[in-house]
Amino acid sequence: DLPMPQVWRTKMVEHIHYSTKEQREKWIQAADYNLFNLRSDPVFIDLLTDSGTGAMSDQQWAAMMAGDESYAGSSSFHKLQRTVADIFGLQFLLPVHQGRAAENALFSILVKPGDIIPANSHFDTTRAHIEYRKATAIDCPADVAFNTLVDEPFKGNINLSVLRKILEDHEKVPFILLTLTCNVTGGQPISMENITAVKQIATDYGKPLVIDSARFAENAWFIQQREHGFRQNSIREITRQIFLMADAMLMSAKKDGLVNIGGFMATCRQDWFDAATGQILINAGIPIQRPVGGHAVLVNAGSFLPAVPQEEYVAQTLAVALYVEAGVRGVEIGTLLNGRDPSTGCERFAEVEFLRLAIPRRVYSNEQMQYVARALINIYRRRSSVVRGLSIVEEKPILRHFTFYCAFK
Ligand code: F0G
């Protein structure tokens, strides 16, 4: 019975820099005594974070070479989606560059001013994303959490009676958050018993449960090692059992995901996913330019209203219909905008007749954007009845789209 050592070996080395005490005194002074201000090379051993600083395996680096960088329809996305669904059981996936972006994406639809979000404890970026939205993050750590002298197996547990009291006293609680493991109390795990009790309370009060899951695998391992009844279960099984209770997960893949950068938001709630991704139009089958661009959604009006001939300015026809339907103004980016060929006077038919819905930054709420989507869907449902387009009554020779007059055919 030999003890089992590591089953991997080192393949690459990186030089680190040793320095003298005098040098370090100078550098830390120059950094205004903020260790975050130190450049990385004067640090000999860097224990600032475990985030994105792990060594990746040969297989991971190789996977990067085999990665599909396609702008749309990347097979790497589908592979990640399958893997996330397989491990966590959550089917809707929004990849992001790191955990804090997942917080931003989900909280932008769930957190409103005046809300209260209870958690075992919030990581700093999580708290910041909540407070930035003028909501309050309340930590409900276990009584023993900060008693460093006692050895308790699950110091990451949430205090259930404090949680219940918050839910009793406050209506504006959009969800309950659990951080696994609980970073700020010292990487302390939450027991399955505690998670299950939180889920029961969440169900009783009709609240969703969101899990900040950066260190989910360690938490599962602690459950396997320390909690009665889990010795025979695999990390995978324990993980599955935990995430079956979650409505959504926020993931910084830089920790237990063992990558240098990356993260995602995953959820079983289609409505959350739709709101976080602008997926509503796509799900309704509306032909839009994909993936959705940075500043605008472009509807392919030719496919949207197939009965309207291109000569009848189909995107302008749709723009008018949307305005009539809901008071929403978009802009035609098609034949009308192209104008006539100056030498021949002929129409320059657009490759695609687009209706552009440009989104001013920081102006409209998600509810308002959902209203726009619904209005478009209404028109889409009755699209076969839209057969008449427009004709121009009067136009100027240049930049006609600013000043033309037209009428329905
Ligand atoms: N949630 C938890 C529990 C975290 O520990 C972190 C990051 C994040 C979210 C944010 O993820 O960095 O990918 O944007 N923790 C690192 C740390 C920075 O040092 O503990 P991120």
Image (tube, rainbow, N blue to C red):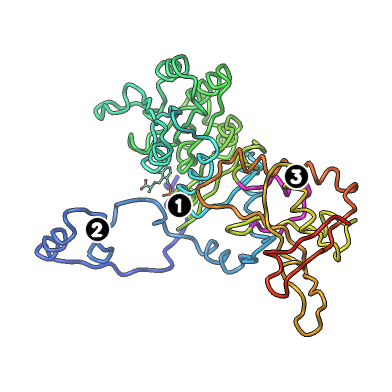
Mark nearer the N terminus (3 vs 1) = 1
Give coordinates of residue 194: x percent, y percent. Answer: 47, 23
In the image, the residue with mark 1 has its CB under 8 Å from the nearest atom of ligand 1? yes
Tell me the element at label 2. Answer: helix
Residue 157 falls in image quadrant:
top left
Is 322 situated left or right of 13 in this image?
right
Say what secondary structure mark 3 lies in: helix
Query: Distance of mark 1 from mark 2, alpha carbons?
Result: 21 Å
Q: Which residues are magenta?
A: 277-292
Q: Is residue 399 above or below residue 193?
A: below
Question: In screen coordinates, is 405 left or right of 7?
Answer: right
Q: Callout 2: few (<14), some (14-19), or many (20+) C-alpha neighbours within 10 Å?
A: few
Mark earlier in primary sequence (2, 3): 2
Identify which residue, 334 or 266, lies in the foreground.
Answer: 334
Does residue 159 show up magenta in the picture? no
The disc, 1 or 2, on the residue closer to the chain's N-terminal end is: 2
Prevalent SS, magenta region:
loop
Q: Provide the residue designation for mark 1.
A: 254
Q: Which mark is residue 37?
A: 2
**In the rendering, at what x and y percent does residue 84 appear?**
61, 46
